Amino acid sequence: MAESKRMLVTGGTGRLGRALVPRLLEAGHEVRVLTRKTRPPAAHEWVVGDLRRRGGPAAAVAGVDTIVHLATTNGRHDVAATGNLIEAARAAGAPHLVYLSIVGIENFEFGYYRAKLACEHLVEESGLPWTILRTTQFHDLVAAICDVQRRLPVTIVPAGMSVQPIDVTEVADRLVTISAGSAGHRVPDLGGPQVRDLPGLARSYLRSIGRRRPVVSVRLPGKMFRDYRAGNHLAPDRAVGRITFDEFLADLPVREGGR
């Protein structure tokens, strides 16, 4: 059995965090979740702190062996928050810092990805033991793009784009292993099992909710969409995930207005 560790998870209330925290507990670790608001009692410890404020994470990092940094503001405050977390971690000792990132971000003209890349550099230069795991997009993101349009007469997707979605439970499982080990620096990317075009994924989503409607592909301008069309976000040589998008959809509850 692996050694029990004291772990801090930032972003523990997000989709991935909600999958990761129970798995860490099941593996026998002590888990602390950083939150900006007081939370009700749970199987893990909640610590109130604000990553955006210098000194905000100080209480959260005290005494931990590993920090799993999932929190994101979609680029708005990510760099400052990561810097504040690193500063607090260095003052508290030398915990292993595990950072979740995204495949291909160095090849994109996209503000959020540029912020993620800057955060990677901060982690690499932090002086702490560190590991960075990059993944492809989650199944949930693809479903959300379709879900917000479910009441429209058509579903619109960007033309010429494919994605390689992965299930958050598989990412969580990989993070459990990484966080229990020693620093691995840039570990191999984690990609979903299939590269599929967006229209096909949208049709799968519509079938899963019992809707029939056209899927319309629209070519969108700008460098960001050019980079997506070029496939800079894909990792076909790292298609190690097993849960397909269709299998993910089969496990989702039926939404209002569906079947």
Image (cartoon, rainbow, N blue to C red):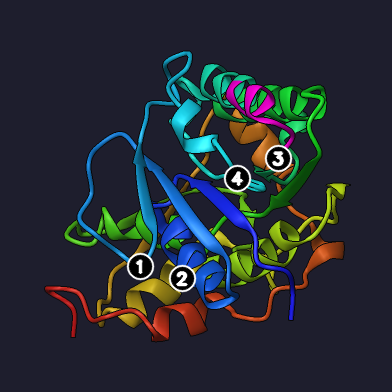
Q: Looking at the image, which is closer to me, 107 or 169? A: 169
Circles 4 and 3: CB distance less than 8 Å?
Answer: yes
Q: Which mark is residue 43?
A: 1
Q: Where residue 150 sits: x, y (%)? A: 23, 62
Give neighbour class at mark 1: few <14, some 14-19, many 20+ (Cα, 10 Å). Answer: few
The residue pinned by badge 2 equals 22
Q: Residue at x 78, y 31 (%)?
A: 128
Q: Residue at x 72, y 62 (%)?
A: 180
| Placement of 65 over or under 200, stated as above or below | above
Secondary element at image label 1:
loop
Q: Amino acid at mark 3?
A: Pro
The extreme left residue here reads: 257
Chain-order first, disc 1 or disc 2: 2
The extreme top residue here reads: 54
User: The N terminus lies in which quarter of the figure?
Assistant: bottom right
Q: Looking at the image, which is closer to me, 186 or 226? A: 186
Chain-order first, disc 2 or disc 3: 2
Q: Residue at x 53, y 47 (%)?
A: 8
Secondary element at image label 2:
helix
Give neighbour class at mark 4: few <14, some 14-19, many 20+ (Cα, 10 Å). Answer: many
Marks 1/2: CA distance?
8 Å
Circles 1 and 2: CB distance less than 8 Å?
Answer: yes
Chain-order first, disc 1 or disc 4: 1
The residue pinned by badge 3 equals 95
Q: Which tag is nearer the camera, tag 1 or tag 2? A: 1
| Placement of 164 over or under 97, stated as above or below | below
The residue pinned by badge 4 equals 64
Marks 2/3: CA distance?
21 Å
Image-based side of 24 in relation to 205, left or right: right
